[in-house]
Amino acid sequence: MNQVETHRSGRIGWLRAAVLGADDAIVSTASLMIGVAAASASKGAILVAGVAGMVAGAMSMAVGEYVSVSSQRDAEQADIRLETHELSSEPEAELQELAMIYMSRGLEKDLAMKVAQQLSAHDPLAAHMRDELGIDPAALARPLQAAWISAASFASFAVVPILALLVAPAALRLPMIAVVSLLSLAVLGAFGGNLGGAPLGRAALRVTIGGALAMVVTALIGRILGVSVG
Ligand SMILES: [Zn+2]
């Protein structure tokens, strides 16, 4: 861990990836297992579905996060390259530009120029990144970090519905997977909402209802396929 990673927004970045991975893991793995269970499959078949869903989901999560955070990083780096070039080729125009930004935020002309000069003397690129491009120099996008964190989080939380299957009595497999998964989603939803500063109850309700809908739909499809194909 270097100094940069103790920065607040950087921490929120990886927590966001972790919470996304966890929600996704519970909804998709539980739905998959419930779909298979509704087709009146054996415990072994439901377990295989759960473990396959866990592995497939963790991989696809890693790839998806890597691709999306990489394109964010590419955009950041292109902006930074252009800005670095402009700063070296026309420093005077860049100083004016910075002063204009501070004026548009409410500083008087003289003060805006003074702030622009002092920040530029200290670190011109950081000042332009922050105030012109809106990039926090301490919280640049990290594709690999986002990829492995969301994959690890997915794999860990996919274990929730799998454990529910393993401890449930034969007659209660489907409801046990559903109830344990929905309770975990509610807790995660409240935690995720807390990160974003949203009201706890509403965030928990949103993710729980979304998860319940996914489970009902796959249960119905599993039921229909189980009857017609099996
Ligand atoms: Zn600039």
Image: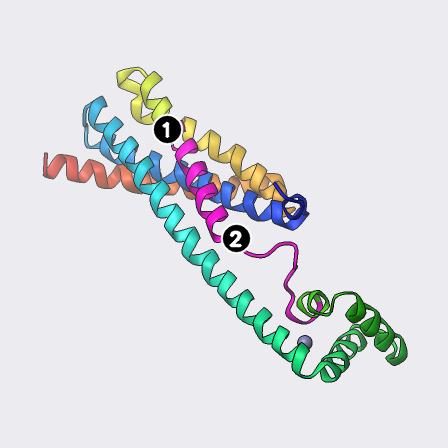
Q: Residues within 10 Å of mark 2 (few under 14, many from 20)?
A: some
Rendered image quadrant of residue 138 = bottom right
Name the side, left or right, on which 73 lies relative to 34.
Answer: right
Residue 17 image position (x, y, % from top left): 50, 46
Mark 2 vs mark 1: which is more N-terminal? 2
Name the side, left or right, on which 84 lies relative to 23.
Answer: right
Which segment did they paint magenta?
131-160
Name the side, left or right, on which 39 lies relative to 194.
Answer: left
Q: Are marks 2 and 1 in contact (CB under 8 Å)?
A: no
In the structure shown, which secondary structural element does the residue marked by tag 1 occupy? helix
Q: Residues within 10 Å of mark 1 (few under 14, many from 20)?
A: many
Q: How many marks?
A: 2
State the residue lying farthest toward the front: 88
**Which of label 2 and label 1 is nearer to you?**
2
> What's the mark number on residue 40?
none
Q: Is residue 184 visible?
A: yes
Please state which of residues 211 and 110 is positioned toward the viewer in this rendering.
110
Residue 159 image position (x, y, % from top left): 38, 28
Give, as a three-letter code, the residue at label 1. Pro
Q: Is residue 209 visible?
A: no
Q: Is residue 212 above or below residue 138?
A: above
State the residue lying farthest toward the left: 229
Give, as a three-letter code, the residue at label 2. Arg
Please state which of residues 122 and 114 is positioned toward the viewer in this rendering.
122
Residue 3 image position (x, y, % from top left): 67, 45
Q: Quadrant of the C terminus?
A: top left
Residue 197 image position (x, y, % from top left): 65, 46
From the image, tell me which residue sits under label 1.
Answer: 161
* Quadrant of the rendered image holding ligand 1: bottom right
From the image, tell me which residue sits under label 2.
Answer: 142
Q: Is residue 7 above or below residue 96?
A: above
